[in-house]
Image: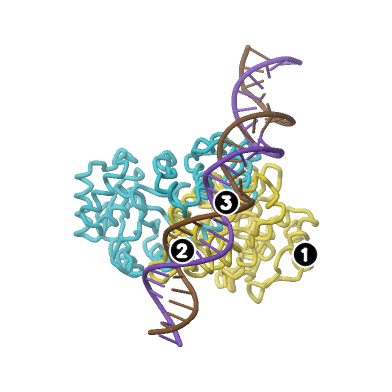
Chain colours: A yellow, B cyan, C brown, D purple
Amino acid sequence: MQRTMRSLLNQRVITENQRNDPLFLQSVARAMQVLSAFHTADGAMSLSEIAQQAGIDRSAAQRIVHTLRELGYLKRDNENSGFLPELRILDHTLDYLSLNPVIRNATPVLLELRRNIRERVDLSLFDDTRVVYAARMQSKRETFFATLVGHSVPTFCSSGGRAILSRLNDNEVRDILDRSDLNPVTPRTITDPVAILDKVQEAREQGYALAREEILIGEIALGVAITDKHDRPCGAIHVAGSLSDWTTDAFRDRVFPLASEAARAISRF
Amino acid sequence: MQRTMRSLLNQRVITENQRNDPLFLQSVARAMQVLSAFHTADGAMSLSEIAQQAGIDRSAAQRIVHTLRELGYLKRDNENSGFLPELRILDHTLDYLSLNPVIRNATPVLLELRRNIRERVDLSLFDDTRVVYAARMQSKRETFFATLVGHSVPTFCSSGGRAILSRLNDNEVRDILDRSDLNPVTPRTITDPVAILDKVQEAREQGYALAREEILIGEIALGVAITDKHDRPCGAIHVAGSLSDWTTDAFRDRVFPLASEAARAISRF
DNA sequence: CACAAAGTATCGCCCAGCGATACAATCGTA
DNA sequence: TACGATTGTATCGCTGGGCGATACTTTGTG
C-alpha cells in the first residue's frame, strides 16, 4: 500500500509540447519511463507489464530493457521471470546525495540532533505535493519503509510537509492542496482543506508543525522547515516519536527547541 | 578523495560490440553517460565538462541535458553556473531498494543487530571489485559519507568485501584482485595480493573477516557474507566500531556471534 | 498435449536526433 | 569600456539509428 500512493503520481507521459520540442529526445524519455515503470511494481515485471506501464509497445520495451540491462540498470529476476532494477541505479543516488548542498550540510547536524533526542530524525526534500526522505537517522524501533531513502509522504499531512507549506503564501499552499490527492493515509489523517490551512497557519505562528498519527498510527512527528538563501522552503527536518513514550506537550517541549536550532544551522545554503 | 576512487571505474564507454548490437540503443546509453558524468564531479558541472566526461560533443550534451532537465533528473545550479542531479533520481533509488529481496529481508534483522551491538551496522551489496552500501544504520559518531546509501568501498580491503571473497573460489578471488586498483585507502590498507589472499583464507576458516583501519583510521570492522539460494555471496553485513572503545579481541568476541546469526537469518533469499 | 505468454532476435523504412552553426548572456582581463 | 573566452540556448538539413511488425524459442499451465 506504500506503493499504490506512488503510482498515482509519476505518470510522466510525453506531452504534446515535448513532442514538438526539437531539444527533447524522446528515446531518452522512453528509457526513463521504462525505469519509472517499476514505481508501480511490487516485484519483478515482465516485458508486457513494463511496456504497458511505460506506454510503449513490447518491441520498444524489449530493446530499451536490453540496453538498460547491458548498462547495469536492470537485470532478470532469477527466481521468478521478469526484470528488476539493478545496482547501478545507486551510483546516481550517491551523486545526487553527495552533491546536494542541503544534505551535505544537514548530515552532521541531524546526527547531533538524533544523539540528543534519541528518536528518529529524517531530512526530507520538498517535491511539490510530496516530500521525499533523503537522509534517515533511525532510532530503536523502525519499520522497513522508515529506513529507505527515496520514500516519500504527502506534503499535506506530514509534519515536515506542513512546516514547508507554512513558509509559502496562501495561494501557493492552496495550489498544492488542489493538486494533491487528499486521501487519508491513516484514519487520523486530516484531509479537510480548511482544517489543513488552519494547521498551516498554526505552523506559521509557532515555527513548527505537529502531526499526530497522520502517517503512522502511534506516531507523533514534529517538522521544521529548511529554507534556501532566498528564504524559500526546500525541505524539512522531521523528528518522530512514539505516543507510548511521549505526550504531545512533552514531545513538543523537548523536540522543538533542538529541531529549530538544527534547522537554523542548515538553512540558507 | 572519496570521489576520485570512483572516477577510476564507471568509465562506461560504448563498446564495439554494443555499437553493432541492433538491440542496443545508443541514445539511451548516451543519456545514462550524461547522468554518470557526475560520478567524477564534486560540484555543479558545465555543459562542456559533462560533454567531455560523457565522451560526447557539447551539442549532444546540451540536448540530453535539456531532456533530462525536463524530466526532473537534472537542474541548473542557481548559485553557481552549471547543472546538478535533481530529486527525481531518488524515485529509482526507492524502486531498487524496496524491490531488492536481500534488502527487504535484511532491514529488520540489521536494526535488531544494531540495537544489540550499538555500533554502526551496514548492509553492502557485492559489485565485483567494489561493495556498495545499500542500507546504513548509524550509531553515535559518524561522518558524512558513512551515512550515504550508494557509497562504495573496494572489495579487497573492506571487511565485508573480504568476507564475500572468502565465499568464492581462489580463481574468482584472484580474478577480482587482478581487476582491482590495489591502491591503499589509508596507510594501513593491505594491498599485497598475497597478504590479501591470506586474509581471505583466514576468513574462510573463521566465517568472518576483520579489517583494522583499512578504510578509516581508528575504525575496526567485522564483515560476514550473505549468500543467495545458490550459496553464492551477494552481499555482506558490516559492523564498525571505534578502536578507542574496543580491542580487536573484544570486538570480535562481541560482534561475531550476533553478526553471523544475522547473516544466517538473511541468507538464502 | 496444445496453448498462452515471456523473452529474444531480425529487418526495412522513415523520421528522430546528430553535428554544425549561430546567438545571447555572463564572465574575467587588459 | 572593449575584448575574448565561456556558458547556456536554439535552429536546421541530412542521414543512420531506432520504430513497428514479424517471427522464433522457451517456459509454464490447463
> In this view of the protein, which residue sits in the foreground, B1 or A258?
B1
> In this view of the protein, which residue sits in the foreground, A67 or B202?
A67
> Gap in Å between the C-alphas at discs 3 and 1?
43 Å
> Gap in Å between the C-alphas at discs 2 and 1?
43 Å
Above or below residue D26? Residue A17 is: above
Of labels 3 and 1, earlier in sequence is 3
- Snapshot quadrant of residue C29: top right
| Image quarter hosting the N terminus of chain B | top left
Residue matched to label 2: A84
Identity of the amino acid at label 3? Val
Task: Name the secondary structure under disc 2.
Answer: strand
Residue matched to label 3: A28
Could you tell me which chain the residue with mark 1 belongs to? A
- Snapshot quadrant of residue A244: bottom right
Q: Where's residue B166, x and y in %?
A: 24, 56
* Residue appearing at x 63%, y 61% in the figure: A10
Identity of the amino acid at label 2? Leu
Above or below residue A183? Residue B70 is: above
Of labels 3 and 2, earlier in sequence is 3
Q: Where's residue A159, x and y in %?
A: 65, 62
* Residue appearing at x 22%, y 44% in the figure: B193
Residue matched to label 1: A198
Identity of the amino acid at label 1? Asp
Q: Where's residue A76, x and y in %?
A: 42, 64
Camera-near label (3 vs 1) is 3
Image side of residue B197 versus residue A248, left or right: left
Task: Name the secondary structure under disc 1.
Answer: helix
Image side of residue B20 versus residue A176, left or right: left
Could you tell me which chain the residue with mark 2 belongs to? A
Q: Are marks 3 and 2 on the same chain?
A: yes
